């Protein structure tokens, strides 16, 4: 027996497919023959479990690969949430809070799970397989750089002494001075490492287009479009976001680098050429997405707060 509710749904389906120039009956025939959806097909489990291709037979290399793949998936989710805030036709405190809670949860999970990298691998195994991966480096995460670009005024991603000089320059010139471009230089000569040259070749055009798209509607700009009452409502979440990305996350990387690489002359090679001892500590680069939210004392002590405010 066809109920009124089912008849109405059939009518709506007919209208939907008619608008596409299609026949509903053909789609219903397809449903009759289609297989039931399974969990493993839906998430492409077989593909997912075969995305790891170690370069060595050393077992712990799989930990290294899988953890970085998980990290990139969290970055993808974060960029999706940022898009919801920055591209909303009208931004509201509710939109901010919903999406910021998601991003903070993603980064909280990443930060808390970094023990997998710090203590979860055998040090000798790491040092063996890591040298087979050169010049690749986590420094080359394009998605993380995209999160930074979408989060704040581009000049805030320039080392502090240079910011007044670049504040009014065209975006492409500001991008030339972005802080991480000095994070993969040779200590002795100051020349770009192969790690950095590869990265720039792959991503710089995309970064420029993204910076152009988000110039006036990045996270900082959208926050400033809120009313004062709405701003007060989202400030705690924005400050957590700032700390998660610019203090806690790089500190976990620094902790891992110290665990595996510290006090060896060849250390610099094992990070793909990044001068991590100067580059990773947040207090050295003092990148802050929302400087207007922090007191002078907090700003001056940026990165010295360790894992807490």
Image (cartoon, rainbow, N blue to C red):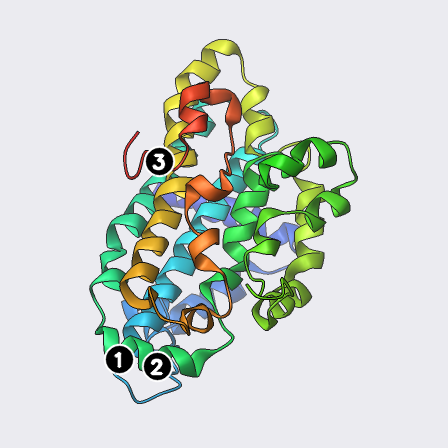
Q: Is residue 86 above or below residue 231?
A: below
- Badge number at residue 129: 2
* Front residue of 153 and 233: 153
Question: Where does label 3 land, which residue?
Answer: 304
Q: Is residue 262 above or below residue 241?
A: below
Which residue is at a point 30% across and 44% down the rendered structure image? 108
Q: Residues within 10 Å of mark 2 (few under 14, many from 20)?
A: many
Which residue is at a point 25% across and 82% down the rendered structure image? 59
Question: Measured from the top left, where is residue 88 in percent x and y?
Answer: 57, 32
Question: Measured from the top left, where is residue 95 in percent x and y?
Answer: 46, 28
The secondary element bearing badge 3 is classed as loop
- In this orientation, does residue 309 appear? yes
Question: Where does label 1 land, which residue?
Answer: 125
Determine whether, in the image, residue 221 is placed left or right of residue 230. Answer: right
Question: Measured from the top left, where is residue 278 in percent x and y?
Answer: 47, 52
* Circle 1 or circle 3, nearest the eye: 3
Determine whether, in the image, residue 245 is placed left or right of residue 90. Answer: left
- In this orientation, does residue 37 appear? no
The secondary element bearing badge 1 is classed as helix
* Circle 3 or circle 2, nearest the eye: 3
């Amino acid at each position: 027996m066809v109920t009124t509710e089912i008849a109405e749904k059939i009518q709506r389906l007919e209208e939907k497919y008619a608008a596409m120039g299609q026949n509903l009956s053909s789609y219903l025939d397809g449903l009759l023959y289609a297989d039931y959806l399974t969990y493993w097909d839906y998430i492409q489990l077989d593909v997912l479990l075969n995305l790891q291709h170690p370069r060595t037979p050393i077992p712990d290399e799989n930990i290294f690969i899988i953890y970085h793949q998980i990290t990139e998936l969290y970055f993808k989710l974060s960029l999706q949430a940022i898009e919801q805030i920055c591209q909303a036709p009208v931004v509201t405190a509710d939109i901010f809070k919903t999406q910021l809670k998601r991003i903070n949860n993603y980064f909280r999970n990443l930060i808390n799970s970094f023990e997998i990298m710090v203590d979860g691998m055998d040090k000798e195994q790491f040092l063996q397989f890591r040298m087979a991966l050169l010049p690749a480096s986590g420094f080359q995460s394009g998605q993380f750089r995209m999160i930074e670009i979408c989060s704040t005024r581009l000049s805030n991603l320039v080392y502090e002494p240079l910011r007044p000089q670049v504040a009014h320059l065209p975006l492409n010139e500001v991008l030339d001075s972005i802080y991480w471009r000095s994070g993969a230089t040779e200590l002795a000569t100051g020349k770009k490492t192969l790690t950095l040259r590869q990265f720039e070749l792959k991503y710089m055009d995309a970064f420029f287009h993204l910076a152009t798209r988000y110039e006036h509607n990045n996270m900082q700009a959208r926050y400033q479009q809120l009313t004062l009452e709405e701003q007060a409502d989202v400030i705690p979440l924005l400050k957590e976001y700032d700390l998660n990305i610019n203090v806690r996350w790089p500190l976990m990387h620094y902790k891992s680098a110290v665990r595996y690489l510290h006090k060896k002359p060849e250390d610099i090679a094992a990070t793909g050429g990044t001068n991590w001892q100067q580059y990773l500590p947040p207090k050295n680069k003092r990148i802050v997405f929302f400087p207007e939210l922090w007191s002078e004392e907090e700003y001056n002590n940026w990165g010295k707060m360790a894992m807490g405010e």
